[in-house]
Image (cartoon, rainbow, N blue to C red):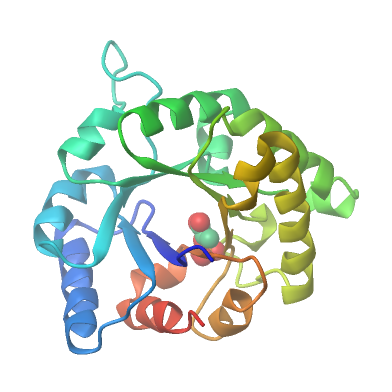
Amino acid sequence: MSTPIIVGNWKMNGLSADSVDRVKQITTSLATQPVSGVEMVVCPPFTHLSLVHQTLNGSSVALGAQDCHKDDKGAHTGDIAPSMLTDVGATHVILGHSERRRDHGEVDETVREKAVSAAKAGLTPIVCIGETEDQRQSGEAEDTIGWQIKGSLPDGFTGIVAYEPVWAIGTGLAATPDDIKSTVAFIRAELVRQFGDAGKSLRILYGGSVDAGNAASILSIPDVAGALVGGASLKPDAFLSIIRAVP
Ligand code: PEP
């Protein structure tokens, strides 16, 4: 069985002091009540990465970023290269989040190129896929996810897939355990179709309004290897409860 992983996506929230304070609360709690057998990652805004890395100071919590560019250097004003992320201690990077697809017009091909570069730089890509409310209502959820898997995951992909139904992100309306179970089974089948045996061991996370109250039921769904957590990851107590809810 693969190691479960809980990833906190802090999005564009707070100033550096807020991120430092949050990390201190998380690491202090983990120092007094350690958790074993769970990987933990926090993904602060770019400008906080270095400071958060210093504050983590070798703790069991890893550092992730929320995006990277597909190129490793060059004329890309405002962008961040994968090697710049490893340079400040990041080990993971979220790619293709629906908010990037929405706000920056990222398409599957962009996400795939980023995943290749991230992996080349030594980062673990966490690639997000998931249907919108309209796609769900019109019965196109599986087709959408299937195309996203084909388009966003490069050959030889060894990263993590995060199933994040767009309608569940930040809405307080998580998908039901039954829906998550059947969609994750569909994703697994697609991964095996695309990658053969290697697709059997890729980790699939669920994301979308995971909180302290629903974490235990979501994390106990077969083949759900963890969660990508937005809003609740900004509250150390809630994030820690989610980590401690891993079965
Ligand atoms: C996310 O942004 O990846 C996410 C899952 O957000 P939330 O937990 O707030 O729904």
Residue 205 sits in quarter:
bottom right
Camera-side residue of 106 and 221? 221
Q: Is residue 70 above or below residue 127?
A: above
Q: Residue furthest front?
A: 197
For the point 54% across and 79% down, the residue is: 215
Residue 80 seen by the camera? no
Q: Residue furthest top?
A: 75
| Side (left or right) of 124 relative to 134 | left
Camera-side residue of 188 and 67? 188
Residue 80, x across and y down, in percent: 29, 29
For the point 71% across and 59% down, the residue is: 184
Camera-side residue of 156 and 15? 156
Quarter of the picture holding the N terminus: bottom right
| Side (left or right) of 183 relative to 86 | right
Residue 54, x across and y down, in percent: 9, 56
Residue 148, x across and y down, in percent: 68, 36
For the point 58% across and 52% down, the residue is: 201
Residue 22 sits in quarter:
bottom left
Q: Is residue 206 above or below residue 130?
A: below
For the point 58% across and 27% down, the residue is: 155
Camera-side residue of 221 and 173? 221
Residue 133, x across and y down, in percent: 76, 53
